[in-house]
Image (cartoon, grey):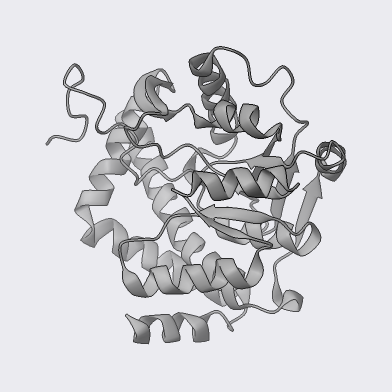
């Protein structure tokens, strides 16, 4: 695994055109040799886009694997490339973030798990330094590298389970990169529709905002066809949170859905978004 990390550090030095060509080869390989994740992606896409034909679903899944492979090379750039070698990008809505910061109660920079998450995070961090939540991957080598990059590059790095640390940072005025769309069945969760399909959904966003007074500012990044990136920061959510935690969580789900539809292949479809929903819901991924 360490040899693989070293290899990708070297590959990250290649021109973007060469990296994209390698990503196409890797996507072709992943599609054929990782049937479990291919199955998960196909199930998710069928559930979320029932209006699409079987052929369209398969084409979208193939495009997603291409996006995943590109995301791997983008992660290498995000972690190791010098600023001068970062890809071209456009950031819109920085004024919304500045206005939210001016409130003085911290900002939850609300996003979701897209394949562009790492590179867009690095691009935004070059302009507006912020902190993040992170969750250790199962692989200890990758977990080590991720922690190093988070701690080196971010204003503050907080483990996903460290609610107290998150609250302290927000109360101190920090901006925290926050993606609540891969929830676990915990106390602060509910089974709510995502693309109309019941899914375990975090209800913590409103709770954290209420505890800290933090503004919740949506932010989404996507890859454009020309190889550049568009980072969009939206105005802080108004009348948020409310007394209805599930309604607040549904508002977040609908917002994420809206931005997934802008580039559906770039969302992280190989995650089992519809698992562990309770005995009243069948196993969506059973074959």
Give above or below for 43 relative to 2.
Answer: above
Locate the C terminus and report the quarter of the image it occupies. top left
Residue placed at 79% from the left, 50% from the top?
91
Residue placed at 58% from the left, 47% from the top?
166
Res 49 seen here:
no
Residue 53 in the image: state x and y as whole percent: 34, 27
Q: Nearer the viewer, residue 277 or 131?
A: 131
Question: What is the residue that sits farthest to the left in this orientation?
Answer: 287
Q: Is residue 39 left or right of residue 111?
A: left
Q: Quadrant of residue 2?
A: bottom left
Residue 151 in the image: state x and y as whole percent: 58, 69
Q: Nearer the viewer, residue 240 or 267?
A: 240
Residue 145 in the image: state x and y as whole percent: 46, 74
Residue placed at 36% from the left, 75% from the top?
141
Residue placed at 38% from the left, 61% from the top?
27
Res 158 seen here:
yes
Residue 73 in the image: state x and y as whole percent: 51, 69
Q: Is residue 71 left or right of residue 218?
A: left
């Amino acid at each position: 695994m360490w040899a693989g990390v070293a290899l990708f550090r070297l590959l990250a030095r290649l021109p973007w055109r060469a990296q994209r060509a390698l990503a196409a080869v890797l996507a072709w390989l992943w599609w054929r040799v990782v049937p479990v994740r291919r199955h998960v992606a196909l199930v998710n896409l069928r559930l979320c886009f029932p209006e699409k034909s079987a052929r369209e679903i398969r084409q979208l899944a193939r495009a997603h694997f291409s996006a995943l492979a590109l995301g791997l090379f983008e992660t290498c750039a995000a972690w190791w490339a010098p600023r001068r070698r970062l890809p071209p990008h456009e950031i819109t809505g920085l004024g919304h973030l500045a206005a939210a910061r001016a409130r003085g109660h911290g900002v939850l920079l609300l996003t979701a798990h897209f394949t562009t998450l790492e590179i867009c995070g690095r691009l935004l961090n070059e302009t507006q330094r912020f902190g993040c939540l992170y969750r250790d991957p199962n692989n200890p080598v990758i977990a080590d590298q991720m922690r190093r990059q988070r701690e080196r590059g971010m204003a503050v790095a907080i483990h996903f389970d460290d609610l107290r640390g998150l609250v302290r940072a927000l109360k101190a005025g920090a901006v925290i990169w926050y993606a609540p769309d891969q929830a676990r069945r915990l106390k602060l969760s509910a089974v709510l529709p995502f693309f109309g399909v019941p899914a375990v959904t975090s209800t913590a966003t409103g709770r954290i905002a209420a505890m800290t007074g933090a503004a919740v500012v949506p932010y989404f990044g996507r890859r454009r066809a020309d190889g550049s990136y568009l980072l969009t920061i939206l105005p802080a959510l108004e009348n948020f949170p409310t007394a209805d935690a599930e309604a607040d969580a549904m508002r977040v789900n609908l917002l994420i859905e809206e931005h997934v539809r802008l580039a559906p292949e770039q969302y992280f479809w190989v995650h089992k978004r519809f698992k562990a929903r309770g005995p009243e819901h069948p196993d969506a991924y059973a074959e």
